[in-house]
Amino acid sequence: MPRNRRRWLIALPLALLAAVLLSGGLRPEWHLQALLWLQQQLAGATEHEAKIDGIRWSYLEAGSDSDKPPLVLVHGFTGSKDNWLPIVRVLASDRRVLIPDLPGWNDSERKAGADPGFAAQAENLSHFIDTVVAGPVDLVGHSMGGGIVAVLAARHPQQVDQLVLMDAAGVRFKDNDFGLAVLAGENPFAVNDRASLKRYLATVFESPPFVPWPIDQALIDRRIADAGFEQRVLDAIARGDQAFLPGQLAPDIEAQTLLLWCRDDRVIDPSAATIWAAG
């Protein structure tokens, strides 16, 4: 590709981003959307939609088909497809990568009364894979997403070639502050102002990132809007009869499985890894 064209392809997205930021005024959400769009461009990812069983899915796609199975990445509680953007370019260097927003989360459709629990979301994800990929995949799930992909792997083994569980929920781990707060009916991830956003980031990051205004306000606004939904999800996956369903189904998982944990995880205690391994 000619050097001038490469420069143009780099300069144009940056110029468009600057225009959005300058015109965003006091609308924090516009700034956040512009930042996410730029991250998608840098990651080489494109955004798509699919209507599956009456549910509108939003997902990212990167890479291309190869001799390796497609890789599907599934976010956790309060997460989204955008969480994976920093590592997408590397993962998509030799295979197709698909990253959905689970139904109800972020840009995918949230239907009133829909079940957000492990079993229902595993079936939703199974239908997504059948529709968008139509073949076995390597499946990665983080936190809540880990519990969901574990249920899928146990109940639909033909869809999963290899499985990665990252800090996966769905087993009874050693008591910690986060788990006890959830069992008491709270949402320890709740965000409603800058102080609670700072506390949330300190819980999920060893070294919390700096989040400038107006990005921080956009994140706060989103979380306030999602507060009721987040509580319904916790009722389903942490306080209901499905709380330990993923771990109960672990013996039925046939796929080769890798467990990845943060040594000092303050959400899903590392003792959970031992329980998953025993399954």
Image (cartoon, rainbow, N blue to C red):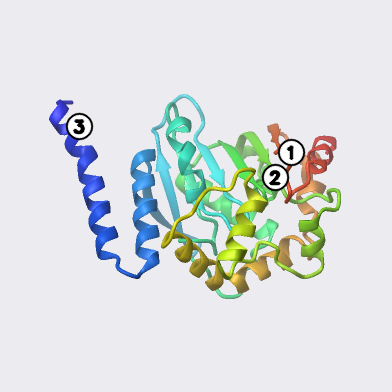
Give neighbour class at mark 2: few <14, some 14-19, many 20+ (Cα, 10 Å): many
Give neighbour class at mark 1: few <14, some 14-19, many 20+ (Cα, 10 Å): some
- For label 3, the SS is helix
- The circle on residue 253 is 1
Distance in Å between CA atoms under marks 2 and 1: 7 Å
Figure quadrant of residue 119:
bottom right
Name the amino acid, label 3: Arg
Where 217 sits versus 93, above or below? below
Say if mark 2 contacts mark 1, CB within 8 Å. yes
Figure quadrant of residue 56:
bottom left
Say if mark 3 contacts mark 1, CB within 8 Å. no
Q: Position of residue 147 (x, y in %)?
A: 70, 49
Name the amino acid, label 1: Ile
Q: Position of residue 258 (x, y in %)?
A: 69, 32
Out of 271 and 57, give the one closest to the viewer.
Answer: 271
Position of the N terminus, as image quadrant, is top left
Kindly report which numbered mark, 3 or 1, lies closer to the viewer in this rendering. 3
- For label 2, the SS is helix
Residue under circle 3?
6
Pointer 2 or 1: first along the chain: 2
Where 131 sits versus 277, above or below? below
Pointer 3 or 2: first along the chain: 3
Out of 197 and 61, give the one closest to the viewer.
Answer: 197
Name the amino acid, label 2: Ala
Residue under circle 2?
150
Position of the C terminus, as image quadrant, is top right
Whether residue 108 can be seen here: no
